[in-house]
Amino acid sequence: MSTRHGTALVTGASSGIGAAYAGRLAAQGWDTVLVARRAQRLDDLAQRLSRATGTTVETLVADLSEPGDLARVARRAADDDIGFLLNNAGINGYGPFAGLEPELMTKVLAVNVLAVTALARAAAPGMLARGHGTLINVASQLAFAGALPPHPLPERAVYGGTKGYVVTFTRTLAAELAGTPLRIQVLCPGLTATEFHRSRGHEPVPGRDESVHEDGGMPVDRVVDSSLAALEAGEVVCVPGLGNAALIDALAEAELAIRTAARPLGR
């Protein structure tokens, strides 16, 4: 039965990490708002979660690349009951940059950057005013792969750039809000066993049942386990499968060294 933690809003909830995370939160007693483009998938998940956990499950069918849909979801994220926001929705738009369709490029930027930022901005003031809240933005290990050539990695200039933004945005926001009651995390999974690679993002993967792309990857439950464990430990950057957490500290130290070395003399 629900312990009524409050309400968690999960984007990209129709499959993969979003669906698995929504299930875990509902099992912990969170009511949920499930956001995605596929109404049937959302309805099926809502029924399963409601039956299994006794929580209240709401669905919002929305394409976060559409300004009207994003505004509607942002209004819900700003409501007083929202205590957990998982910005998980994302599309890849993989392919050679010079041949990337402008419409798809715009969609990738809208979903991966604008929607993440807008929904975080909608939710954060209320969380701060109430003295509690959790914000998790899902990025990717490809955020750290800028200089690596494609093959076997995908052609990813725009996608990698958007995920780099999510990492920097979340880390900087966490630093700004340090000392407040908000818990903030950027989740950076590697290849995960979902259907993410089965669509470039123009349209969602069709069908009522979830599937897994041929590349396989880490099971989604392990990704969620890593995120929740990092959240409890107060870690801002979560990279599932990373055996040496000191590498994250080394990244921050390298950034500081670059900024320090680049300062003009006398300043």
Image (spheres, helix red, strand yellow):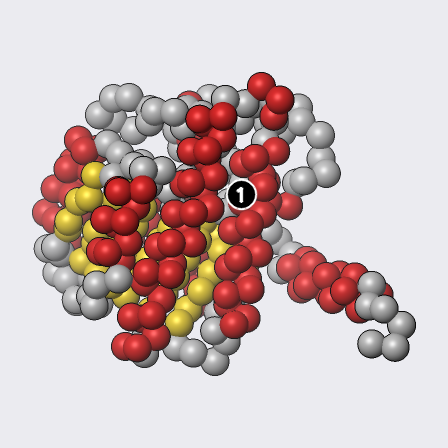
Q: What residue is disc 1 on?
A: 162
* Residue 115 or residue 222, whichever sits in front: 115
- Image quadrant occupied by the C terminus: bottom right
Which percent across, then down, holds residue 88?
Answer: 38, 46
Residue 155: x and y, percent?
61, 27
Mark 1 is on which residue type? Answer: Thr
Q: Residue furthest top?
A: 99
Compare residues 236 and 210 and report the one nearer the observer.
236
- Residue 153: x %, y % from top left: 62, 29
Question: Residue extending furthest right?
Answer: 265
Q: Nearer the viewer, residue 247 or 158?
A: 158
The spot of residue 160 in percent (x, y) is: 58, 39
Residue drawn 29% across the image and 29% down it: 210
Q: Is residue 112 above or below residue 7?
A: above
Disc 1 crowd, CA 10 A, few/some/many (<14, 14-19, 20+):
many
Q: Nearer the viewer, residue 234 or 71?
A: 71
Name the side, left or right, on which 41 lies relative to 142.
left
Q: Is residue 238 above or below residue 191?
A: below
| Image quadrant in which the N terminus is located | bottom left
Q: Note whether 188 is above or below 130 in the view shown.
A: above
Say which element carries label 1.
Answer: helix
How many badges with numbers are in the image? Answer: 1
Q: Is residue 177 above or below residue 216?
A: below
Is residue 216 visible to us here?
A: no
Which residue is found at the position 41% from the left and 50% from the top? 116
Q: Residue at x 75, y 61 (%)?
A: 254
Side (left or right) of 123 relative to 160 = left
Q: Name the residue at 21% across, 63% down.
A: 79
Say left or right for 9 vs 152: left
Which quarter of the picture shows residue 85?
bottom left
Q: Can you see residue 149?
A: yes
